Image: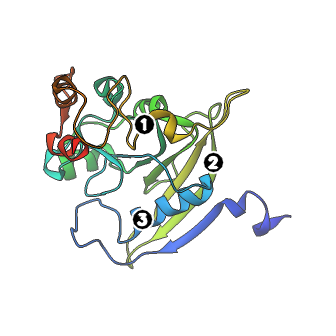
C-alpha cells in the first residue's frame, strides 16, 4: 500500500489528552498519558506480565521509578546518565523503559535546576538494562532520533495533543532488536518485577537472612540513594 496507508504511516497514531493530571507537576504527562502509553506497549509486546522502568519519572507512578529529584519519592534517586552501575544488578532487566526527560538543557535548568541532558548517553544506559525485544519509549516535544539504528527499530509514534495553543508531544517506541539466535526473555527468568538479581530476589514472607535486607538498603554507589520505604514494601 502507498500514501497514508503505507506500512511506514501505519506506525503513526494520534491522541488528544487535554486534561492535566491532578498533581500538575511541571513538565509531567497529561492525564491518562502514562497509562495509555504502557497499555499500548503491552499490546505491541503481546503480554501483560511486564517489568517497567520509569526513567525521569517525575510524578509517573508505574514500575521501578528513577529520578534525580528526591521530592517525587522515586525508588532510586539517580542521574539517568549513569544509573546502571549504582543498581549493581538489583533491578532489571526490563521489558519496557518509559523515559520522560527534560526537553532541552534550558528547561532542565529552569524547571528542575538540573544540568545538561545528553540523549546518547542516557539512552545508552537504558540499553544496558532493556531486554532484547523490549521497548524504549521516549516521550518528548521533538521527534527524537533512533539512539542506535543497529540495535533499535521504530515500531510506533504517538503524537499527543494537549490543550489549545500548546505544543503537542510525541512518544516514540523503539524496539530493541533480537540478536541472532536469541529469543525474547521471560520476566520469570529474572525473578519478580522489578527483579533483584544475584540472590536478591523479592520473595513473599520474611527475607532469607538479615543480610539480605541490609544489602538491599545500602547502595555501593554514594551518588545513588535507595528508597528504603520502597524496599520494605517488597520485603513484606
Residue found at the very far right of the displayed protein? 1
Q: Which numbered dot is residue 191?
A: 1
Provide the secondary structure element on which disc 3 rests. Answer: helix
The residues tagged by marks 3 and 2 sit, at their Cα atoms, a distance apart of 20 Å
Q: Residue at x 18, y 23 (%)?
A: 211
Residue 150 in percent (x, y) is at: 65, 30
Classify the position of the C terminus by image quarter: top left
Q: Is residue 70 above or below residue 12?
A: above
Q: Which residue is mark 3?
A: 35
- Locate the N terminus by quadrant: bottom right
Q: Residues within 10 Å of mark 3 (few under 14, many from 20)?
A: few
Q: Nearer the viewer, residue 148 or 192?
A: 192
Rendering quarter of residue 84: top left
- Among numbered discs 3 and 1, the one appearing first in the sequence: 3
User: Viewer-proximal residue, 59 or 234?
Assistant: 234
Q: Secondary structure at mark 1?
A: loop
Image vertical order of residue 100 relative to residue 127, above or below? below
Q: CA distance from mark 3 to mark 1?
A: 24 Å
Locate residue 72, reporting x and y percent. Answer: 18, 52
User: In which image quadrant can residue 213 be found?
Assistant: top left
Q: Residues within 10 Å of mark 2 (few under 14, many from 20)?
A: some
| Above or below, comparing residue 171 to residue 167 in the picture | above
Nearest-to-viewer mark from 1 and 2: 1
Colour treatment of the image: rainbow
- Report the side of 120 relative to 175 (left or right): left
Residue 154's label in the rendered image is 2
Which disc number belongs to residue 205?
A: none
Q: Secondary structure at mark 2?
A: strand
Q: Mark 3 or mark 2: name the one nearer the start of the chain.
A: 3
Amino acid at each position: 500500500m502507498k500514501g497514508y496507508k503505507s506500512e511506514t504511516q501505519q506506525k503513526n497514531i494520534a491522541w488528544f489528552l487535554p486534561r492535566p493530571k491532578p498533581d500538575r507537576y511541571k513538565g509531567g504527562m497529561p492525564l491518562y498519558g502514562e497509562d495509555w502509553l504502557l497499555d499500548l506497549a503491552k499490546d505491541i509486546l503481546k503480554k501483560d506480565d511486564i517489568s517497567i522502568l520509569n526513567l525521569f519519572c517525575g510524578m509517573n507512578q508505574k514500575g521501578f521509578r528513577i529520578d534525580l529529584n528526591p521530592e517525587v519519592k522515586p525508588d532510586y534517586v539517580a542521574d539517568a546518565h549513569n544509573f546502571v552501575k549504582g543498581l549493581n544488578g538489583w533491578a532489571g532487566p526490563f521489558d519496557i523503559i518509559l523515559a520522560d526527560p527534560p526537553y532541552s538543557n534550558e528547561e532542565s535548568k529552569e524547571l528542575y535546576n538540573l544540568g545538561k541532558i545528553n540523549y546518547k548517553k542516557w539512552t545508552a544506559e537504558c540499553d544496558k538494562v532493556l531486554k532484547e525485544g523490549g521497548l524504549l519509549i521516549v516521550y518528548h516535544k521533538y521527534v527524537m532520533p533512533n539512539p542506535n539504528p543497529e540495535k533499535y527499530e521504530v515500531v510506533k509514534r504517538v503524537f499527543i495533543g494537549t490543550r489549545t495553543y500548546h505544543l503537542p508531544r510525541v512518544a516514540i517506541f523503539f524496539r530493541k532488536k533480537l540478536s541472532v539466535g536469541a529469543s525474547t526473555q521471560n520476566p520469570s527468568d529474572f525473578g519478580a518485577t522489578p527483579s533483584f538479581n544475584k540472590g536478591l530476589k523479592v520473595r513473599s514472607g520474611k527475607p532469607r537472612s538479615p543480610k539480605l535486607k541490609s544489602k538491599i538498603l545500602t547502595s555501593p554507589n554514594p551518588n545513588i540513594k535507595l528508597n528504603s520505604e520502597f524496599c520494605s514494601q517488597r520485603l513484606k
